[in-house]
Amino acid sequence: GESVGLHLPTLSVQEGDNSIINCAYSNSASDYFIWYKQESGKGPQFIIDIRSNMDKRQGQRVTVLLNKTVKHLSLQIAATQPGDSAVYFCAENGDSSYKLIFGSGTRLLVRP
Amino acid sequence: DADVTQTPRNRITKTGKRIMLECSQTKGHDRMYWYRQDPGLGLRLIYYSFDVKDINKGEISDGYSVSRQAQAKFSLSLESAIPNQTALYFCATSDLSSGGSTDTQYFGPGTRLTVL
């Protein structure tokens, strides 16, 4: 079936370093991908999205890379800060224009 | 996101009780969703609604029902709660008017439900 998975369930980084969170997706029909950040006790918060006609998209301190050949998605966070500590989810739209398929999440821990 | 609110934020109930979780949004979005989140898992779609007259089942709708009372309100009911419905429940909204082929979904703060 359709699935979105993550390679690393927990990622620990030093404050100030760059973080890379990876995600593999399985549905070749997916043309929309999105990253969410979820802090403890809060709902998922939109970070950045990318459509399949792009390979890279940059936001404020974040970059999403899409490799359609190997069905891989990554989120790069520059100069990681303590406030970046959270669980990060990737999601794809599969063959739908409105439903999202979520991965199980990666926990990012930022060491002071 | 303060534009999407959920009540209650926490609820403890007993097996067999009927429970209603409410969601309201001020974003003016047409589409609303209910998700369930279990520890170590991503979000799973329970129900979704494209407008007041359009309600659809998601991947895990058994044991749940919904009501779209207005564009801004979407409630989730557990008719007879059971312990394995203990989870975090999230409401989300989206609107295609932002362009593109797929909506960006915006989530509420969640409701933590415990069924004893």
Image (cartoon, rainbow, N blue to C red):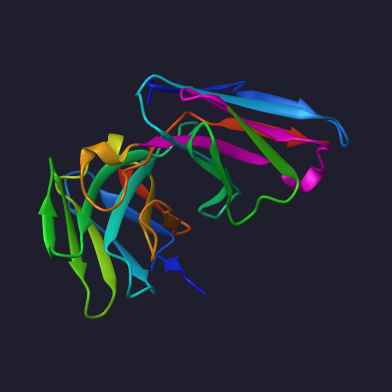
Q: Is residue B93 magenta?
A: yes
Name the spot of residue A65 as percent of width and height, x first: 17, 62
In the image, residue B110 sits, relative to residue A63, either above or below, namely above
Write the start and end of the magenta stretch as one range: B69-94
Left or right: residue B101 compared with residue B32: left
Instruction: Name, please, the residue furthest toward the right.
Output: B16
Instruction: Name, please, the residue furthest toward the front.
Output: B53
Please state which of residues A14 and B50 is positioned toward the viewer in this rendering.
B50
Name the spot of residue A106 as percent of width and height, x first: 40, 55
Left or right: residue B82 compared with residue B109: right
State the residue at coordinates (75%, 28%). Answer: B19
Q: Quadrant of the N terminus of chain B?
A: top left
In the image, residue B43 sits, relative to residue B94, either above or below, namely below
Quadrant position of residue A51: bottom left
Q: Is residue A55 magenta?
A: no
Q: Is residue A112 visible?
A: no
Please state which of residues B60 and A36 is positioned toward the viewer in this rendering.
B60
Q: Is residue B83 visible?
A: yes
Name the spot of residue B95 as percent of width and height, x first: 33, 37
Left or right: residue B78 compared with residue A95: right
